[in-house]
Image: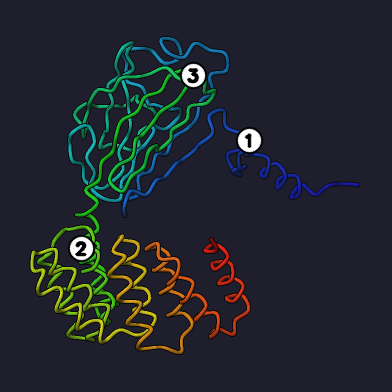
Amino acid sequence: MRVSRYVLCALAAAASPALAQVPPLQLPAASPKASVTQKVGLTDVTVRYSRPAVAGRKVWGGLVPLGEVWRTGADENTTLSFTSPVTVGGKTLPAGTYGLHTIPGEKEWTVILSTQANAWGSYSYDPKEDAVRFTAVPKEGPLEERLLFTLADPTDRSVAVTLAWEKLRLSFPVEVDTKAVVLGSLREQLRGLPRFGWQGWNGAAAWCVKNDTALDQAEEWVNRSISMNRNFTNQSTKAALLEKKGDAKGAAELREKALALATEPELNQYGYQLLGQKKVDEAIRVFERNTKDHPDSWNTWDSLADAWATAGDRKKAVAYYEKALSITEDEEQKKRIRGELAKLQP
């Protein structure tokens, strides 16, 4: 069988590297990529890196020379990203992605965050591009075969960036002014759809009151909420705000007005909130008010019984649990209430 010379030419062209790009095979990397993210308040802190292995080699002073800039990983340099401004090494840095380099030493390391985050390794590292550099002291730890970064001990204001490889551990803190970040976020959010409902303005004010920050701003926000829809929730927020600002009398008067606006579930929730704050006597008064306003609701009597049980008055707790049991038709609730009564038996 004769093959057309046109076919032969086509086959030759297909086999020519210059004329056809053959995709590379996908194979396991010697140092696989990894990343870890931790949310601190509203701020995402992320480390992206490649994970070399010990593989029986001497790491410190061998594979990784002491006294020289190291990419702190393999392949591209390791990066550290923040979605909000943070404080690292005593310096505040804007949100962004930074190249993480280190200079390992026998007793202490130099940690460097570079404004250049797209370098291959540390070969093109330039100290002029340092965003911050500081020292950290390494510690000994259990063997870690592959380089591992963790974001340890997270709180709502900080997290520890921790490197572990071979038998060495190195850690440094990243701190976030979470109150400032959240306040800025609330201002932005209230320029969107949440601005059209009373709930958004009240929620922002309530967060400020709870976190004891920007109370004047909170007052503007809660007043805006009240102007849109005066209700138990935003009246309660304003009462808490007045109390924070030292106006105990005004807070008490406003709370009394707020209670008159409350629905049964709102009063119930408020009562349990007071119980959570260890204000048992106040909670009992709220639950008693709810039973007076809603005497046919088993839930109001059940909540009042919970409060008296918390106060340690077994007799009253039993009486009100039995009242709730006589009203409810829900078999699950009956079973639960009987369980509560059994706990109160002498």
State the CA–CA distance, disc 3 to disc 1: 25 Å
Q: Which residue is mark 2?
A: 208
Name the residue nearer the viewer: 200 or 303. 303
If you read the primary sequence from the N terminus, does the residue marked by circle 3 or circle 2 appear first? 3
Q: Is residue 256 above or below residue 282?
A: below
Specify few, some or many for label 2: CA neighbours under 10 Å numbering under 14, 14-19, or 20 or more.
many
Q: Amino acid at mark 1?
A: Leu
Q: From mark 1 to mark 2, how far is it between C-alphas? A: 52 Å
Q: Residue 283 appears in which quarter of the rendering?
A: bottom left
Q: How many marks?
A: 3
Residue depicted at 31% across the width and 30% down the height: 172
Q: Nearer the viewer, residue 239 or 218?
A: 239
Residue, disc 1: 27
Question: Which quadrant of the view contains residue 123?
Answer: top left
- Secondary structure beneath disc 3? strand
Identify which residue is drawn at 42% across, 80% down: 300
Q: Position of residue 49 (x, y in %)?
A: 44, 35
Q: Is residue 126 left or right of residue 64?
A: left
Q: Which residue position is annotated with label 3?
A: 166
User: What is the x, y in percent for residue 271?
Assistant: 34, 72
Residue 174 pos. (x, y %) = 28, 38
Q: First in sequence, mark 1 or 2: give its number.
A: 1
* Contact? badges 3 and 2 (CB < 8 Å): no
Which residue is located at x 41 percent, y 16 percent?
A: 64
* Coloration of the structure image: rainbow
User: Is 7 on the left or on the right of 176, as rendered?
Assistant: right
**Residue 231 location in percent, x, y?**
25, 84
Given the image, on which type of amino acid does mark 3 rest? Answer: Glu
Please say if 60 is above or below 24: above
